[in-house]
Every structure is written in structure tokens, then in C-alpha cells.
């Protein structure tokens, strides 16, 4: 497998890890939070540099469901990341002497709102690429031959992750965070640090699973409709 491609995947994995790491502000403290956020944005820039050719293919891309959905998700991710970056600068303690006049309570709310939307949209982004990621995993593990039992186990694991992701969404009040509602129900890091990250990963897994199987269903439905149209065309007129 191409080592540069693997390096890109590692960078993307580290960026996703830094995003999760930065959510634990009340455990990390501000300095670690800002360092994690800065490193994540640098890796996002690297990701876009590696994938710069994709932007040139957008006008010529076939307008299929997955392709159109991918374009919409990428635009939404760009908007959410831009909002996260701008608000990060405005509320940064390192720049407080310069930006203190702009970094009020509302800006912090928008920063939190953008962060949680980035978590959801990045998860959807990964869900669109899940077949490719699973293909990489199969090559790395040497599991290139179809295996019905393995497929069944993986699907069962996906269902369990999705179910736990629903529970985690309530535990972290993700609905309130995504709608910019105030909540005083903060996670208690003194009781459990690992639990917070497990919930975050489960929420990401929920949206990955939903996106992956939604795309599979839409593509399967489109194939059935196409096959039905072809059969109708070849049938003799009554």
C-alpha cells in the first residue's frame, strides 16, 4: 500500500483525535485546549493540501446521490470549521490583549456550537468514506476474502455502537449543544475521564453508521429502480 496514503490517514486520525481531545476543556485547561486546537487546524490544512485535486473535480463530478451528498457535507464542514477557527481566535487567551473586545459570551457559545457541529459533520464525512477505510483495514490485516461470519459480527458491532451512541447523545446533551441551548449539566471529569471520550466516540460512531447504511440503502434503491426500468424497456408491448 502507498506509504504516502497511509501517512495521510494517520494525519487524519490524529486530527480526529485532537478534536475529541479538545472537547474536554474542563479537564485539560485552556493551554492544552488551545494547543490541541492549533495542532488540529494545522492538520486540517495538511489534509486539504493533500486533497486539493478533489476541488478541481467537483464541477465535472457525476451528479449521483453519494457525490452530491459529499459536496454538501464538505461545504457544511468548511463553514463549521471556519466558524470554529474565527471564534477560536476571538476567544483565545493567547490573543486576549488583541481580541478581548470581541471574545464575549456569545462568541464562546458560537464556538461551542461550531465544535459540536464539526464533530457531527466530520462523522458524516467519515461515514461517506467508510467503504474505503474498511478496504484499507482489510488490506492491512490481510482479510481480503469475503467472510460471511466476519461481516455479520461487524454489522452487529455497528448496531451496538449506534445504540450506545444514542444513549451517549443524551448523556452529553448533544441535542442542546447542537441547538445552542444553555445547559448546566457538565460532565464530571473527577468521576470519569475515559467515560467522556467513550461517549464522544460513540456519538461519532452513531453518525458514521447512519451515514454509511443510508448511502448503501439509497444506492441499492437506485439500482433496483434502474433494473426495473431496464426490464420495462425490454418487455414486449402488449
Image (cartoon, rainbow, N blue to C red):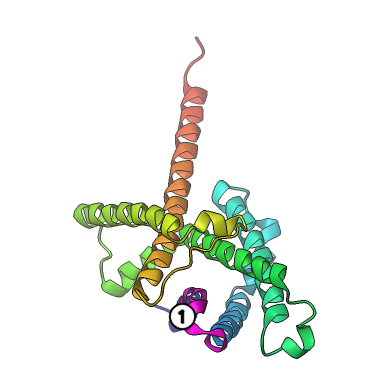
Q: Looking at this view, is 234 or 51 the one in front?
A: 51
Q: Looking at this view, is 236 or 14 the one in front?
A: 14
- Compared across the picture, whether 149 is left or right of 16 comes to left
| x then y, percent, for residue 109 | 65, 66
Q: Residue 196 lies in magenta, yes or no?
A: no
Instruction: Characterize the magenta stretch by its predominant secondary structure.
Output: helix
Which image quarter: residue 182? bottom right
Q: Residue at x 61, y 80 (%)?
A: 41
| x then y, percent, for residue 184 | 53, 63
Q: Residue at x 42, y 49 (%)?
A: 213
Residue at the far front: name it.
184
Which image quarter: residue 202? bottom left
Q: Residue beneath label 1, please?
A: 27
Classify 10 Å Cα crowding around label 1: few (below 14), some (14-19), many (20 and above). some
Q: Which residues are magenta?
A: 17-32
Secondary structure at badge 1 equals helix
Amino acid at each position: 500500500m502507498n506509504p504516502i496514503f497511509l501517512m495521510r490517514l494517520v494525519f487524519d486520525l490524529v486530527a480526529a483525535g485532537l478534536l475529541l481531545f479538545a472537547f474536554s476543556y474542563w479537564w485539560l485547561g485552556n493551554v492544552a485546549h488551545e494547543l490541541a486546537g492549533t495542532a488540529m487546524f494545522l492538520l486540517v490544512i495538511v489534509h486539504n493540501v493533500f486533497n486539493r485535486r478533489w476541488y478541481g473535480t467537483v464541477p465535472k463530478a457525476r451528479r449521483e446521490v453519494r457525490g452530491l451528498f459529499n459536496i454538501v457535507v464538505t461545504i457544511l464542514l468548511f463553514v463549521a470549521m471556519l466558524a470554529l477557527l474565527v471564534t477560536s481566535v476571538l476567544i483565545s487567551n493567547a490573543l486576549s490583549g488583541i481580541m478581548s473586545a470581541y471574545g464575549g459570551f456569545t462568541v464562546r457559545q458560537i464556538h461551542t456550537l461550531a465544535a459540536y457541529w464539526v464533530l457531527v459533520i466530520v462523522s458524516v464525512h467519515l461515514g461517506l468514506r467508510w467503504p474505503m477505510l474498511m478496504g484499507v483495514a482489510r488490506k492491512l490485516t490481510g482479510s481480503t476474502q469475503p467472510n460471511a461470519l466476519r461481516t455479520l459480527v461487524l454489522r452487529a458491532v455497528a448496531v451496538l455502537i449506534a445504540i450506545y451512541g444514542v444513549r451517549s447523545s443524551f448523556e452529553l446533551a448533544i441535542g442542546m449543544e447542537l441547538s445552542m441551548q444553555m445547559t448546566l449539566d457538565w460532565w464530571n471529569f473527577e468521576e470519569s475521564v475515559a467515560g467522556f471520550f467513550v461517549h464522544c466516540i460513540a456519538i461519532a460512531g452513531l453518525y458514521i453508521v447512519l451515514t454509511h447504511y443510508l448511502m448503501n440503502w439509497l444506492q441499492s434503491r437506485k439500482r433496483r429502480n434502474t433494473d426495473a426500468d431496464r426490464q420495462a424497456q425490454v418487455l414486449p408491448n402488449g
